Amino acid sequence: MESVSTSIVVACPGCGFGNVFHQPYPYHAGYGNQGFLYNETGNRTLTWSWHDPDYVAIAGQKPPWALTEAERRELEDRLSPAPDGTRWLFRNPARCLQCGQPISLPIAETVYYLRYDGSVDRDAVRGWAPGLKDVLKKKLPAVPWSTRDVWLGVIAAAVIIGIAYGFVFLLRALSIKPNIDLWVGLFSAVFELLFLVPVWWFSVRKHRASLRTLGFVKFKFSVVAAGLGLLFACFILSGIYASLLARFGFQVRADPTPLLDRLSTPWPYFLTIMLVAPLAEETFFRGFVFAGLRSRYDWRWAAAISAALFAAAHLEITFFILAFVLGYLFAALYEKSNSIWPGMIVHFLWNTFAVIAIYAQM
Ligand SMILES: [Zn+2]
């Protein structure tokens, strides 16, 4: 008897299935000062109070439907996934349990909500459920260096590497011709390792940062697996991009084989590309620049800025787009794992394939 008076049936406009909800009517989130979100599958509801201090800390004293796009994303990013592993998103509607068609609008479009069985109730202020606290991911630890330190570090890297290039031109101008094996093998590695100087100066020396703070912490292998999938997508993209450039007579990157053919062995150069470059570049662009910027800005902006710097540092205009995409991918892997390793591993693999491609041409 009670189930009759406390249940509603919402007929699906698509398949006609009667979705049963154990609530007397669609609840009005505004009456209870509540927020609600549906998961992507549309079969679970997350509810919370907008007086919940953990919500206020993220979004301020605002009802969730009044949040800006950036504030919504901030909250979405902080929420742990729903029980089925999908995300709680502002744009998700409630869906038919039988066919998956929308049966009620997302929070941005209505304050009336349906409460699915097995929902996640976090309306702590009303006293009958725990707060949002344990639904939130742990806040990413902020790094001690500031965005100012990051920009000073970027300028320092540009100056240091500029001086190194100047040194190379000076040697050329003086017609000093060192042993070419030593030249290519040593200097390519030194150029990469110079990136570590500003990292050391502005994080370790200035703020006593540890390797852990620079992101050298353990990680979940699932992030590397996701990275490999995206790396494969980058391979396809680079193939399409290379053939597009070839139509206009350009190459993505300058062909190093004429130079390498003059060496007694290309292996010191190859090892630099495979090992030293991922280590030094990930430490600088992700461990230092990206981590510094994301402490202050939205991580997507931090990823885009660090990727643009990473792409610019390769000094090849035709490689810029591809390097930007890769840089963004490495930063996203850092963001998802909170560790520098997944990006470094994927970077290592990309460069190793590049070496194999060069070797095959020789
Ligand atoms: Zn349906």
Image: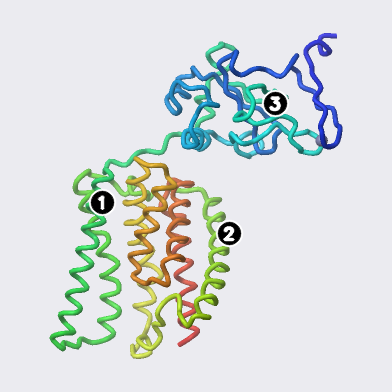
Tell me how far mark 1 sits from mark 2, CA to CA.
32 Å
Q: Amino acid at mark 3?
A: Gly
Tell me how far mark 2 sits from mark 3, CA to CA.
33 Å
Name the residue located 50 percent from the left edge and 29 percent from the top edge: 67
Image position of 209 (left or right of 279): left
Residue 272 x, y percent position in the rendering: 35, 72
Instruction: Give the mark toward the camera: 1 or 2.
Output: 1
Q: Within 8 Å: ligand 1 and the Cβ of disc 1?
A: no
Which residue is identified by label 3? 118
Rendering quadrant holding ligand 1: top right
**Which quarter of the rendering shows the N terminus?**
top right
Q: Amino acid at mark 2?
A: Gly
The numbered mark, 1 or 3, whose residue comes first in the sequence reads 3
Image position of 199 (left or right of 53): left
Q: Amino acid at mark 1?
A: Trp
Residue 351 x, y percent position in the rendering: 44, 70
- Does the image show residue 348? no
Q: Is residue 141 above or below residue 281?
A: above
The numbered mark, 1 or 2, whose residue comes first in the sequence reads 1
- Nearer-the-camera pick, 95 or 215: 95
- What label does residue 229 carry, if any? 2
